[in-house]
Amino acid sequence: MTPLAGSTRATEAKVIDVDLIEILNFVQVEQNVAPYKYSFALSDITTQVSAKDAGNWSITTYYLGPGDGKFYVVDTQTVDYSFTATTGLLSSEKDIIIDKPLNFADNAVYTFTFSEDSMLPKGGFIKIEFPPEIYFNQRVAMTAGTCAQTKCQVFGDRTIIVQTAQMTPKNKIVTVEIGGVKNQRSFNPSGSFTITTFDTDGVSLIDIGFKKNVATSIAGNIDSFTVERTNTTNGAINRYRFTLTTTIPMVSGDVLKFSFPESIIVNAGGSTICTPINDKDRIVCGISGNDIQITLLKLETENKLQWSMTQIKNPGSVQPSGSFKNILFESESNYLVQKYQSTEPVAVVTNTIPANI
């Protein structure tokens, strides 16, 4: 205890109990006229664990009777409130770990690792809020990861609250696993996850923070990519028809990229025109040499795309043309969604009919 300037000072103080302090032997430094001012500072005080009012406090003054050595009450006062502590910082210790970082995968387990400025009591709560683009299956989340071992609550498909089974000291690393998560459809980094801890009343804040995002690292799969021609004669200029199917649904704004084999000529005898087979689909085609970029504007079927391309010149001989390459889909923001990953050659143009001499 440190007496402050301008007050009636004490020369002695001691801690009687964890919540009781006794201050003795006051020395009057101002004129001895009531009311008296008592100002002092207490150090090494541990504040409450959460941002709620610390509760009531009381103070009683005593007078030491002359001769008998007894203390007599002079004044007493109880106040129903004191002060509210501020929230601390919750810090991420590692990147979020995804057990299967495949684009658009179901039931992934996300592992969150963090530490706190404050102690987290047994029976407290950890609230994890997901960004808008990531969600979880509520039924699976309640029975997977950490929630398979302790009590959890879900609020919609983007907020989950885990009740703590034991006290965790401040600055100690905490790990929480949440299952049933649906991954994003591309490598695009997500928005931030927010983690907040609460006292045992479920209302009083302890710490808040984390603010980490996450990204997948394994592309989805383009299931098939096939090509048909209207004229199979070598060297003939004709229309090519393409059919593509995907595992991950295609959406407006996605961009399909691929390259023709070198022995096939695009824009032969005129400008190549791309046309969707389904008249309800809308696409825009960009061509640079043999590299093709098709932007999807509207699709009736989310897992199948068919289109034709005119003014394509077949290989000059019956020798196989080679394979179409670099077949992939990117999102509107240029992040990889899915690609053709088979080791088999893609749509090799063979068995052309020899042209007449």
Image (tube, rainbow, N blue to C red):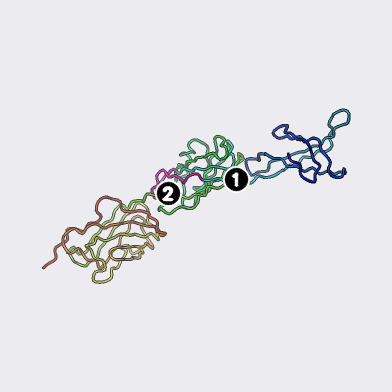
| Residue extending furthest toward the left | 357
| Mark 1: few/some/many CA within 10 Å (<14, 14-19, 20+) | some
Q: Position of residue 314 (x, y in %)?
A: 20, 64
Residue 9 is a magenta residue:
no
Q: Position of residue 250 (x, y in %)?
A: 37, 56
Classify residue 66 by image quadrant: top right
Inspect the image, locate mark 2, and give the three-letter code of the amino acid beneath it.
Answer: Asn
Residue carrying label 2 = 183
Question: Does the CB distance between marks 2 and 1 fall below 8 Å?
Answer: no
Question: Who comes first in sequence, dot 2 or dot 1?
Answer: 1
| Residue extending furthest toward the bottom | 270
Residue 203, labelled with which disc?
A: none
| Circle nearer the viewer, 2 or 1 | 1
Q: Residue at x 28, y 68 (%)?
A: 272
Pick the quarter of the image with the C terminus.
bottom left
Q: Magenta segment, principal secondary structure?
A: loop
Classify residue 179 by image quadrant: top left
Q: Position of residue 30 (x, y in %)?
A: 84, 45
